[in-house]
Image (cartoon, rainbow, N blue to C red):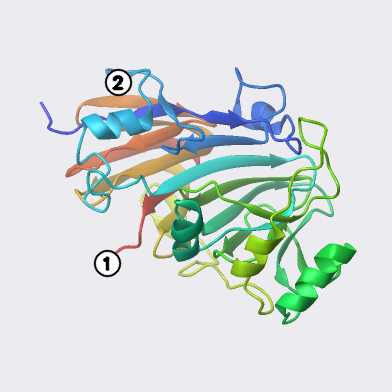
Amino acid sequence: MTDFPAPFLLLPSYKDYLWGGNRLASLFGKKGGPERIAESWELSAHPDGESVIAAGPFRGQTLSAFLESNPGAAGTAVPPGKEFPLLVKLIDAAQNLSVQVHPDEDYARRNEGSRGKTEMWYILRSDPGAFLCCGFSRPMTGGEVERRIREGTLADVLRSVPVKPGDVFFIPAGTIHAVGEGIVLAEVQESSNITYRVFDYGRAGADGRPRPLHIGKALDVLRMEEGFPPPPGGEGEYRPVPGGKARLLCSCPSFTCSVLELNGRLSKTMGNESFLSLLCLEGKALLSAPGGGLGIGTGDSVFVPAGRRDILLEGTGEFLLTFPGRPE
């Protein structure tokens, strides 16, 4: 008998934002939700859309309810009573997303009563010619940004970047950005749902009215320097690991994320410090741990509670591994 729960599968929360499509269903088996799925929140304890435990003794519980009744399952990095720190998503941009920015922790706490939002994107699919925008193409001033927003010329000073599968982008809070149409990506972010739109192509929301912009708050938080930073700690190449190869995508104060290409068996020693999020991007594997085994397939999201023991992943495929903070 163990004193920590076994790993379990999570059911996502779906978002049907107007720019979404149907590729999360066709690529990752995301079904049972809306016809148009813009985002699937694969690891979430956020009140705007919680993951739910799919099976086992905790079946039907939200992730936050499970963590409340199992203190320590999130690890010492997330003490009981503290907000769950991460949100992991799959995103299908069938249309352009709005040009937007997210606040940092200090501004969000003071003005929204929420966490700030730093995020990372890992590109999974991209149509020919697909691009995204990150940062400005030159240093800006608040006055010029505001003028260009009013005139509708802001896109002229955004840095456009063509994308391909495997690309990684780090978007610190305050960085202006927009995902372009024809891109499917995985997003790892702080657990926040605060977005300030600065341009939205004049689109109407579900109520038939143009979606609101948040120009004043956006100007408060925007970083005006040119460009955007590379992913901290990110590795450009894969390195061999037992059972396959791995690549560190990003390691920042908020989260550490790696991609694993598995073709065999990988053993990992867990600790009390943190949980592990495992998202299967493609393939099939068996996850074995004290307390039980778990079959995993394309699109499955697994929560591995903190606790000292070894886990074994055996199979073939591509997996996104995420935990809060960065290693000591």
What's the residue type where badge 2 is placed? Phe
**Quadrant of the image containing the N terminus:** top left
Mark toward the viewer: 1 or 2: 2
Viewer-closest of 290 and 39: 39
Residue 15 coordinates in the image, percent (x, y): 62, 32
Query: Could you say whether the residue bearing mark 1 is in a helix, strand or loop?
Result: loop
Against 31, is 222 above or below? below
Mark carried by residue 58: 2
Image-quadrant location for residue 155? bottom right
Mark carried by residue 70: none
The tally of labels here is: 2
Residue at 55% x, 41% y: name it: 89
Q: CA distance from mark 1 to mark 2?
A: 32 Å
Viewer-closest of 144 and 162: 144
Residue at 45% x, 48% y: name it: 191
Residue at 40% x, 25% y: name it: 295
Image-quadrant location for residue 26? top right
Image-quadrant location for residue 266? top left
Mark 1 near mark 2, Cβ–Cβ under 8 Å?
no
Residue 86 coordinates in the image, percent (x, y): 42, 48
- Pointer 1: residues within 10 angstroms few (<14), some, or many (20+)? few
What's the residue type where badge 1 is placed? Glu
User: Which residue bears the numbered disc 1?
Assistant: 328
Residue 104 coordinates in the image, percent (x, y): 50, 63
Against 96, is 117 above or below? below
Residue at 77% x, 52% y: name it: 180
First-in-chain label (1 vs 2): 2
Query: Could you say whether the residue bearing mark 2 is in a helix, strand or loop?
Result: loop
Viewer-closest of 104 and 187: 104
Q: Is residue 53 left or right of residue 16?
A: left
- Pointer 2: residues within 10 angstroms few (<14), some, or many (20+)? some
